[in-house]
Image: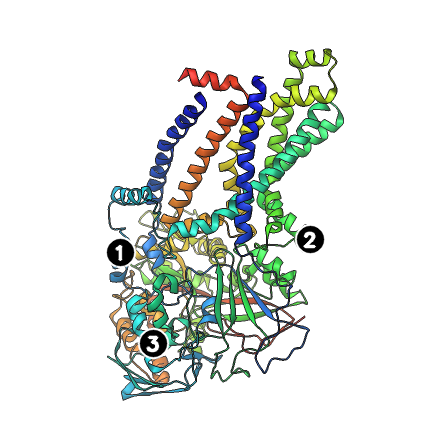
Amino acid sequence: MNSWKAVSKTVAVVLVLVVAVALIATYLALSPPYVAPTTPTTPATTPTSPTTPQLKRTLIIAIPEEPTGLDVQQVTWSNEVHDMIFQPLVVLDENMNIVPDLALSWEVTEEGTVLVFHIPSDAKFSNGDPVTAEAIKKSIERYKNISPYAEDFADVVEMTAIDKHTLKITLKQPAPYLWSVLVTNYGAPVNAEVAERVGPDVFNREAVGSGPYAVKEWVRGSHVTLIRNNNYRTNLPFVANKGPNPYVDEVIIRFIPEDLTRLTELEAGRVDVVRGVPLEEVKRLRDNPNIRLYETLAPGIHYIMVNVQKTPLNDVRVRKAIMLALNRDEIAQILDNNVVPWYSFLSPSQICFNGTVETVAETTYAHNVEAAKELLREAGWVDTNGDGVVDKDGIPLELTLLSPVDDPPLKKAAPLIQAQLAKVGIKASIKEYTYDYIRELTREWNFELALRRFSWADPDILIYLVHSVYGNYTYSNPEVDVLLELGRSVTDMTERSEVYSRAQELLLKDLPLIPLFVLKDYTAVNKNVKGLLILPPYGTMFVNDVRIEQ
Amino acid sequence: MGLLSYTTKKLLIGIPVVFGVTIILFYIMYSLPGDPIKLIAGERVTPERVEELRRAWGLDQPPYVQYFYWLSHVVRGDLGVSIVTKQPVSYLLMQRLPYTLMLMLISMLISYAIGVSIGIVSALMKGKPIDGLLSVTAIVSYSIPGFWLGLMLMLVFGYYLRLLPISGYEGLHSLLIPALSLALPSSAAVMRLMRAEMIEVLNEDYVRTAWAKGLPRRRVLVVHALRNAVLPVVVMLFLDIPWLIGGAVVIETLFALPGMGRLLYLSIIRQDYAVVQGIVLIITILTVVFNTLGDLVVAALDPRVRVEKGEGM
């Protein structure tokens, strides 16, 4: 009898479990599943819409990382999702010239202290609210209030709506670096009225902008579904279709962290576009006839940051020896030539890039083991005991090289850099940390050599790395400080480019940073996606003319 | 009877366990290198703004103040706000938890279906070539890393055969390959245990008696042998929970599933302390609850356990 009692209890426990399973299953059934791309959606209701049946009407983009929020004014890094939702006033074309997007036109007057933007009279946010001068003013005011990058607009002293469609921005001083904010989605107007009404948390989930697509649904950890913004208008000179794209009804942006999974989805045709192509897969994808690779140069360089306060690195001859000891072609080779060897501080995808500076740097610092050894000898470093490591006063030249585990090209280059330094008698030991931790260590001046990178279209980024106050890293040179400050206020682009070229020349003499390479960014796209445009500096995708054939 | 008080006692013991885990975790997170504020502040953020943010998030306080602040809110059901996404942690967790629970349940079902049945077969065939073959297979599948297995299954069923989705959540069938990748290695452990227990029980006197009584084969095996042999295997089911969650971290990331494991991984990387604390709290509670459940099931199946523990305490 006792066993029967036990059995009934077992049954009870099992029943409870079954009920739990059933409950969860129901819950799951209710939560929105990711929509499979195979089901063709109904043709667009736009009058221009052709009902060609062989077009796939949903564009699926796979990216590695989910945004932390959709409100571009609250995030510290933005991505493809924000590019779809928001529309900057102006953007950069492939030659790094500023061209209109939302704005019709603009004027810079009063020696660069007044900017006037003309907004099209029919400009609207995706929810139908008009994008007026007043609305843009509100958006920028909100940016100054809540964005972690509020400083971007610090020089803005006054904004006035001259009329409904004309915005006048008055600056404390000329601020050419402001353009590099305006050309990104950070500088794009958000519907501040809605943001105010729903509050920052909700707006961070359901942001409203005037970009080509609008938020329909965000399933955390999975994807964002964007629906065509039928109010979209653009003045982009390089796209044919200036209105909503009639061929693509929805854009689904999926978050797939694992590289191999992301590429398998592309090769299986379940995803149309893949961002964040791992460098080691580039070769294989090139051989795939169904896939096209888009290549852009990154707006910045990968470099070694040097602690110039610490002996022996405070001796410029040692830094120059390191510069000369590096064989950048060899580094590019082990990275499958997915990088371009680089000797100066601005990449071709940056504003104010000057090819001459790079050419001169390349000639001055071309790989030369003998010259490097000679410089070390001059500085008093000679290998006296024959152990292959140079020494001075009995102390061998040993340095620590911080290598970021989460930056594949830098991580892969580190052992080669170590080997190349060994050839001139410098013993480098590699320590691996995450990129962000290395950045912190360098901020605390607690390092010797650190592998780092930067990515920002405007050369003003240098001020945060080598200026003695703004950067507050180990390097300080009043002349460089003056030039970088000047770079913030010179509006004439030729003149500004000249300022940054002079600053680079000084940096090339002091070498607080040792340039390594410029990375190529790849986007892998299925061949049946036609009309996609991907432009430097950030590899921004313009889907205005996209059609997906089946 | 003792069952209720036994359960209560078990759960009460669980409470200090939960707190202990959160304290240890808090200490570990605090002593980890890296500063979450500097992470959420990008390259172009001024030092003043960094300090402002640090004050705003209460991270300028000493760790014990931070912990008690957190604790006092948890007791009131508030898990805090994610420093990275600025969303309430409970909101983030409620969205993720169902996927992970479902993944774990399916994989447990698969794992036990395979493990128990093969274990029995193996025990009955003890010493025969088929037993050897099954044992070797079990050892091999136990040794395969779930990550690699997942990739292979993904390639075969998703890419080549196109039977199931490659990644992402498109419905319950999306969980099949991930669950299988989690289940296969653990099914091997189940199988080994089932086999050993079954062999042991089959040698017991009462089983021999049952045979001698001339009972039908099925009755001897199921009622007399299996019911006793399955006991430790059932207990293992409940103890497997933390192990399965660990596996879910890898598998959910690989298959781009919107589960809690992937959120845990991402939050550790992003130093999103509040979210990590929240998830670990849930894992700890789940572990305690399932351990208690495991004890209860044993007690229900085997009254001796209940009596012994009930009187001993």
Give how far apart the Cα atoms at labels 3 and 2 are. Answer: 52 Å
- How packed is label 2: few (under 14 Cα within 10 Å), some, or many (20 or more)? few
Disc 3 marks which residue? A178
Dot placed on the residue nearer the N-terminal end, 2 or 1: 1
Disc 1 marks which residue? B56
Q: Amino acid at mark 2?
A: Leu
Asked if one can make out residue A366 in the rendered structure from this viewpoint, the answer is no
Relative height, residue A92 to residue A291 (above, below): below
Give how far apart the Cα atoms at labels 2 and 1 are. Answer: 50 Å
Relative height, residue A401 to residue B300 (above, below): below
Subunit bearing disc 2: B
* Image position, residue A256 (x, y; %): 53, 57
Quadrant holding the C terminus of chain A: bottom right
User: Which one is closest to the eye, mark 3 or mark 2?
Assistant: 2
* Image position, residue A123 (x, y; %): 43, 82
* Image position, residue B150 (x, y; %): 61, 47
Q: Amino acid at mark 1?
A: Ala
Tell me if B132 is positioned left or right of A342 in this view: right
Figure quadrant of residue A57: bottom right
- How packed is label 1: few (under 14 Cα within 10 Å), some, or many (20 or more)? few
Quadrant holding the N terminus of chain A: top right
Residue under the point 30% across and 42% down: B71
Give how far apart the Cα atoms at labels 3 and 1 are. Answer: 28 Å
Disc 2 marks which residue? B163
Q: Secondary structure at mark 2?
A: loop
- How packed is label 3: few (under 14 Cα within 10 Å), some, or many (20 or more)? some
Q: Secondary structure at mark 1?
A: helix
Q: Amino acid at mark 3?
A: Leu
